[in-house]
Image (cartoon, grey):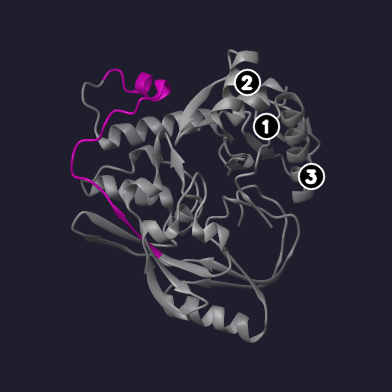
């Protein structure tokens, strides 16, 4: 139940398919003073050992349209949600096609790809607040979204996400500015949301291994953000280094940094780095989370020693 295929056991486990199930499971755990881990598609976690507590597998399925919004249950598959929105004539999610995982995990990481982040879609997140012991909505301002960050990530034990409502558009989508997508769409004068989603899917499949074939969690490290002065110094020393403006600072390419340190395609026993994309750590089978994190730390040390930049893992390490 994790896309890296790492071995782990839960002391207790249940799947919840409605709000009442979720609240009952949380109450059961609280009565026994058990730690709780909420698991969606298992695509954003690294299990380094067994879980001594209750694992709640989120299975709430829901799709409802309210004007320019679609509300999805937290257990819905994310890519299926993207495709549903397109089938209903909406645009807005097409650049986020094929991101693995569940809808409930999307606001936790503030997922993003090809210039679009979830926070741009005015998400309203319905949660069970374990402190207040009630269901309530959390809007974008309260969620405090940042780059692969949110209130839900920083206060991981407080909120159980039940559903997510996204504001979408009936207008034709803008053409993404990314060269690989533009190349995929070059034959189309006015690509539709479906065309863009299909192009994103093709590009992602070329770059990222299928977890069903080779264990991985997608991009393993966040792209580091540095202040402008540091970015200028790095650019002067490494003119070929990719850099992107980001909210008054500069975003670097973690994949490029890792590649330059010679890790692309590296193998360390049962784990390694994808030969197709240096940002993807893979599990060949028979390994453990400790093996994978040892490789991650080796990469972090190498990048920091060479560039003075600290890489931060994107998945949750458990």
Instruction: Kindly give the residue lying farthest to the front in the view shown.
Output: 229
Q: Find the distance from the CA under tag 2 to the CA under tag 1.
A: 10 Å
Q: Find the distance from the CA under tag 3 to the CA under tag 1.
A: 23 Å
Residue tagged by mark 1? 309
Viewer-side label of 2, 3:
2
Pointer 1: residues within 10 angstroms few (<14), some, or many (20+)?
A: many
Viewer-proximal residue, 309 or 36?
A: 309
Pointer 3: residues within 10 angstroms few (<14), some, or many (20+)?
A: some
Left or right placement of residue 236 versus residue 195 in this view: right
Is residue 183 highlighted in magenta?
Answer: yes
**Looking at the image, residue 34 lies above or below residue 117:** below
> Tag on residue 291?
3
> Tag on residue 247?
none
Residue tagged by mark 2? 234
Query: Disc 2 on helix, strand or loop?
Result: helix
Residue drawn at 42 percent across, 74 percent down: 18
Please identify the quadrant where the C terminus is shown: bottom right
Q: At which x and y percent is residue 166?
A: 31, 54
Q: Which residues are magenta?
A: 163-187
Query: Disc 1 on helix, strand or loop?
Result: loop
């Amino acid at each position: 139940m994790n896309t890296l295929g790492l071995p782990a056991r839960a002391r207790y486990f249940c799947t919840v398919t409605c709000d009442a199930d979720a609240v009952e499971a949380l109450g059961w755990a609280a009565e026994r003073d058990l730690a709780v881990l909420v698991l969606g598609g298992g695509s954003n976690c690294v299990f380094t050992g067994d879980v001594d507590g209750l694992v709640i597998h989120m299975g709430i399925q829901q799709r409802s349209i309210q004007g320019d919004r679609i509300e999805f249950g937290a257990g819905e598959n994310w890519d299926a949600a993207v495709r549903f929105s397109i089938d209903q004539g909406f645009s807005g999610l097409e650049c986020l096609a094929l991101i693995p995982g569940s809808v409930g995990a999307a606001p936790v990481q503030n997922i993003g790809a090809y210039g679009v982040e979830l926070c741009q879609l005015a998400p309203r997140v319905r949660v069970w607040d374990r402190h207040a012991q009630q269901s309530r909505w959390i809007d974008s301002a309260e969620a405090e979204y940042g780059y692969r960050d949110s209130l839900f990530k920083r206060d991981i034990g407080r909120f159980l996400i039940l559903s997510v409502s996204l504001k979408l558009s009936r207008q034709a989508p803008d053409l993404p500015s990314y060269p690989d997508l533009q190349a995929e769409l070059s034959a189309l004068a006015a690509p539709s949301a479906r065309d863009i989603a299909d192009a994103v899917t093709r590009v992602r499949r070329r770059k990222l291994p299928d977890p069903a074939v080779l264990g991985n969690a997608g991009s393993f490290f966040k792209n580091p953000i540095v202040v402008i002065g540091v970015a200028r110094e790095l650019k002067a020393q490494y003119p070929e280094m990719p850099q992107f403006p980001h909210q008054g600072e500069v975003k670097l390419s973690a994949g490029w940094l890792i590649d330059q340190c010679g890790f692309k395609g590296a193998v360390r026993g049962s784990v390694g780095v994808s030969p197709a994309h240096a940002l993807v750590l893979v599990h060949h089978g028979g390994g453990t989370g400790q093996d994978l994190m040892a490789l991650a730390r080796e990469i972090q040390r190498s990048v920091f020693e060479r560039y003075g930049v600290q890489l931060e893992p994107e998945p949750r390490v458990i």
